[in-house]
Image: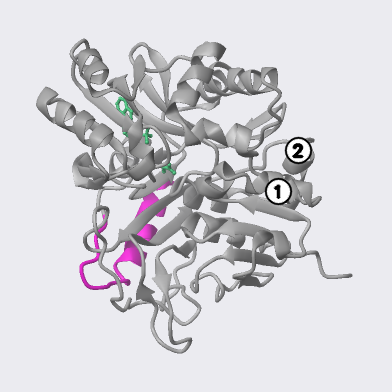
Amino acid sequence: MSQPRPVLVVGSGAREHALATVLARTAPVIVAPGNPGMATSSTPFPITVSTDRPEDLDVDLVIIGPEVPLAEGLADSLRGLGRLVVGPGADGAQLEGSKAFMKELLDEAGIPTAKFGAFTSVAEALAFLATMSPPYVVKTDGLAAGKGVLVTDSFEEAKDDVIDKLMGEAFGKAGRRIVIEEGLIGTECSLLALCDGERVVALTPAQDFKRLGNGDAGPNTGGMGAYTPMPGIGQDLVAELVTTTIEPLVRAFQARGINYRGVLYAGLMLTEQGPKVLEFNARFGDPEAEVLLPLLQGDLVAWFTSIAEGTIAPALPAPGASVCVVLAAPGYPEAPRKSMPISGLASDGQLENAIAGVTVFHAGTARPDPDGPFLVSGGRVLTVSATAETLKDARALAYQAVAQISFEGMQYRTDIAEEAVRREELS
Ligand code: AMP
Ligand code: GLY
């Protein structure tokens, strides 16, 4: 039998490492630009990293991980070259690139979401803020890696943040326009679906832990851990969530002539008044991908090909449960420190003492000496992900693995999926 054609994954984080790992079950994978922890993974087919431009690589299928290349139109240029691409064009990626665009689309599609206003003027923003009640929510319009959001009960803090975001330089161009929102209270849930332009197939709901510290204390981050499935969110509720939030969005895209082939990630708040959309993203969540992808069984290359071709195949089975814990650099998210050696990893980037069901996905790691240790090189450094039959077992495995790894100043939460395990035991 001839060797299958390589598949390209664009990106360099733990999400892309997870994508590469599941795709490498059925085909060789190239990750561009990738990171050194990916190149050494032990999978059925090899994973290699490449610094070539994605356009220059000879592949048929491309999966684009992060939001920035999507917003910049990478999917369009690759499709122009005849590649099959999982990821929306620049038109569809505005969903994530502009919160104001997203809110307009939700409004048009009748999708429940928080009341909001979008502003460029400080005076108008503060006048609107004065009409809201706590918790106050202030967001930058544009891509800010999950870090441009303030949720606070203090009016003074919200007011200062409005002034900062509109006048300050902290978020550069992303900060010139802001969105002020009604604060929603309830259970947060990430619902990811794959869309072939017309039809959608949802993955199991996952929960992400956005705050830096235990008990949801500290600043918002890109995400400090995740788990799936969510006890209490059964198939009926998922079907209802898809019908009320994702399908109307796809129809709104179609009405605008946008052929959206890629991931639709709904960040939902399950409130007492029903589910409401907090945000939509145009890509896999990170760290949600690191729990959702390892559970999927079957041929991911064939499945992603069907999505890119506009003929989506039925959902892949995803039995069991998965929990992941993010290990972050000291100083993350404001000012991560780098260059410290990481201990506990073998030369293939995985655990020195392997644990069945555990994979270490690399994000901010470097390896200047190919025979030397991995070094910290980014804010979120590693995502330690475990699968098992139950959340309880997956959580235990993930933390058993975390205990093997260390670097100076390592930050991580010790309460990922703790509450979910309690709910799992009650059900
Ligand atoms: P976003 O980048 O819009 O997903 O916001 C990051 C995080 O801020 C979300 O995951 C929520 O935890 C929180 N958040 C955002 N919008 C709201 C809102 N309207 N009400 C309550 N919490 C919110
Ligand atoms: N986990 C949050 C995000 O990917 O935006």
Tell whether 358 sits left or right of 46. left
* Residue that mark 1 sits on: 77
Q: Where is residue 108 in the image (x, y as percent from the top left)?
A: 54, 12
Q: Which of marks 2 and 1 is in front?
A: 1
Tell whether 40 sits left or right of 189. right
* Quadrant in which residue 420 is drawn: top left
Is residue 230 among the parts visible in the rendering?
Answer: yes
* Quadrant in which residue 398 is drawn: bottom left
Q: Where is residue 255 in the image (x, y as percent from the top left)?
A: 68, 17
Magenta range is 389-412
Q: Is the residue 172 above or below the residue 95 in the image?
A: below
Given the image, on which type of amino acid does mark 2 rest?
Ala
In the image, residue 398 lies in the stretch drawn in magenta: yes
Badge 1 local density, few (<14 within 10 Å), some, or many (20+)?
A: some
Between 80 and 290, the one lying in front of the other is 80
Q: Is the residue 156 above or below the residue 387 in the image?
A: above
Q: In which quarter of the image is ligand 1?
A: top left
Q: Where is residue 286 in the image (x, y as percent from the top left)?
A: 45, 48
Q: Position of residue 213 (x, y in %)?
A: 21, 48
Dot 2: what SS?
Answer: loop
In the image, residue 401 lies in the stretch drawn in magenta: yes
Dot 1: what SS?
Answer: helix
Question: Which quarter of the image is occupied by the C terminus?
Answer: top left
At 61% from the left edge and 48% from the top edge, which residue is drawn?
A: 296
* Residue that mark 2 sits on: 313
At 68% from the left edge and 27% from the top edge, which residue is drawn?
A: 258
* Quadrant in which residue 11 is drawn: bottom right
Tell whether 146 sits left or right of 96. left
Given the image, on which type of amino acid does mark 1 rest?
Ser
